[in-house]
Image: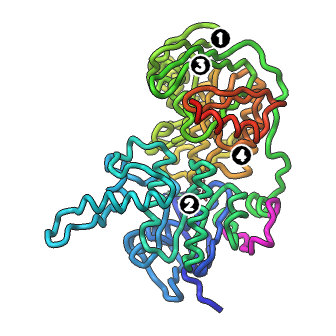
Amino acid sequence: MTVPVLEARDICKRFPGVVALDRVSLQVFPGEILAVVGENGAGKSTLMKILSGALQPDEGEILLAGQPVRFADPRQALAHGIGIIYQELSVIEALSVGENLFLGRLPQRSGIPGTVDWPRVWREASQILERVGAPIDPQRPVRELSTAQKQLVEIARALSQDVRVLILDEPTSSLSLQETERLFAILRGLRAQGVAIIYISHRLEEVFALADRVTVLRDGQVVGTLPIAEATRDGLIRMMVGRDLSAYYRTVRSSPGAPRLEVRKLVRAGVLHDVNLTVHAGEIVGLAGLVGAGRTELARCLFGVDPIDSGEIRIDGKTVAIRNPQDAVRHGIVLVPEDRKLQGLVLILSVRENIALPVLSRLAHFGFPSRREEERLATSFVERLRIRTPSIEQRVLNLSGGNQQKVVLARALATNPRVLILDEPTRGIDVGAKAEVHALIAELAEAGMGILLISSELPEVLSMSHRVLVMSGGRIVAEFSREEATEERVLAAATRQSVAA
Ligand SMILES: Nc1ncnc2c1ncn2[C@@H]1O[C@H](COP(=O)(O)OP(=O)(O)OP(=O)(O)O)[C@@H](O)[C@H]1O
Ligand SMILES: [Mg+2]
């Protein structure tokens, strides 16, 4: 029998109030793709950080090709051929794309020690980016890139290093379908060369498309490992959540009322062109489109993050001026952003503080912050969204990725908005919690909120929305009623018009 290239034996890891890993064992063999799945907070990222040297286990051991090893830090793990793409982006915003790709190992000019061979940096960076299908100018600062492009830079960096084990922690969360396909082709190529790959995703379709075996974690323990041929979707879900899940989506029953949000002739030069749309009370309007179509840009303008050049925004029939997010919240518009790290959360504050922050003045008692109100609010959302945390006083920094996303959602909902804009609200959220988030969105619409739902998951948009708008090249290029909207039609509209625009 072949020896696993990397093996974890009885790994335990505790954090204050949490047992993140409880005697976890796992093996990965050369030339295979092992998927690791489990609910938010199950321990997936913690295990990967231990395997790649970013965290030390409390107990247990790691074996590399049968030999026990200890990695003091990620550099040591990489020196042993273990590379990782983290769940949270770790690119450095202020540096160029090329510098990020070669961080800590910039090629030097021969003969002149201490000087970087820049032509070589740009040339090799271009080649690597080309390979992942991301023709980005390597001299551009990373801060100018979209989230998807940053993720591609991150992937390119890992692929440019010779590794025998490559760990990917939710690498496709902000990639388009084409970019994902491209990544899969690269991963299959690496597998054929004998590289072992550990792949984490909440998208079970990806697991079935890619993996050879799958390991399921629940509550910090391994529930089971099986060959993909023996796994079924429902079976995996049952192993992950410990119960059956019936409905994946919940449709909205209410019928839309008066206009809540009206956008007229909205322009942001070079980005948004003459955008018109209406969202009614009790209505969920889906906003579909390819990456770069202008959906996130529209959301940012409506929430006052980016300025508009002209156009009108009306809330409940009244024209409003939105110059910043505070204005937006005051007028009843709130945005759940796609990039929680940058726009959503104050990571060093607690769950309670993050949820209460936007509504502090409302909770205040005669001008004094009311701790008890804050606690009540935070506790109710922790229960409602099943945020997994040892307490509401836990720093958000210490929550798992999916649970951070739930805090972002809670924080937006706590403002009790009239118009809710959701940009990829279920990204990184596990299958069980997804159903809960969908039910919540439907409930809010039924209570009269107007909801604009941006999502790259077409099934989510199609099943949740009363109407679907399609954006392309900064314009709204098509509108479909719930009955008319099919995946084929929406995709056709999203791709056809991008050429004409
Ligand atoms: N630095 C830390 N301090 C305290 N608790 C932590 C820390 N890191 C992780 N945890 C806790 O450990 C548990 C496992 O978290 P982990 O990030 O491994 O989950 P995950 O399976 O990757 O979830 P997700 O799907 O949401 O990314 C969670 O309860 C989390 O809150
Ligand atoms: Mg994780």
Mark 1 C-beta closer than 8 Å to ligand 1: no
Quadrant of the snapshot with the N terminus: bottom right
In primary-sequence order, the first of circles 4 and 1 is 1
Residue 377 visible within the image: no
As measured in the structure, the alpha-carbon distance from the residue carrying label 1 to the one carrying label 2 is: 42 Å
Count of numbered labels shown in the rendering: 4
Instruction: Determine whether, in the image, residue 136 is placed left or right of residue 228.
Output: left
Residue 434: give its label: 4
Label 4, residues with CA under 10 Å away: few <14, some 14-19, many ≥20: some
Element class at badge 2: strand
Residue type marked 3 = Gly
The residue at 52%/44% (across/down) is 393
Residue 316: give its label: 1
Contact flag, marks 2 and 3 (Cβ < 8 Å): no
Residue type marked 2 = Asp
Q: Which residue is mark 3?
A: 332
Mark 4 C-beta closer than 8 Å to ligand 1: no
Q: Position of residue 500 (x, y in %)?
A: 59, 31
Queried whether the magenta region covers residue 31, the answer comes back as no
Residue 227 visible within the image: yes
Q: Position of residue 469 (x, y in %)?
A: 69, 28
Vertical order, 429 against 86 (above or below): above
Quarter-of-image position of residue 41: bottom right
Q: Which residues are magenta?
A: 221-235
Contact flag, marks 4 and 2 (Cβ < 8 Å): no
Contact flag, marks 3 and 1 (Cβ < 8 Å): yes
Residue type marked 4 = Lys
Mark 2 C-beta closer than 8 Å to ligand 2: yes
Element class at badge 1: loop
The residue at 62%/74% (across/down) is 23
Q: Which residue is mark 2?
A: 169
As measured in the structure, the alpha-carbon distance from the residue carrying label 4 to the one carrying label 2 is: 19 Å
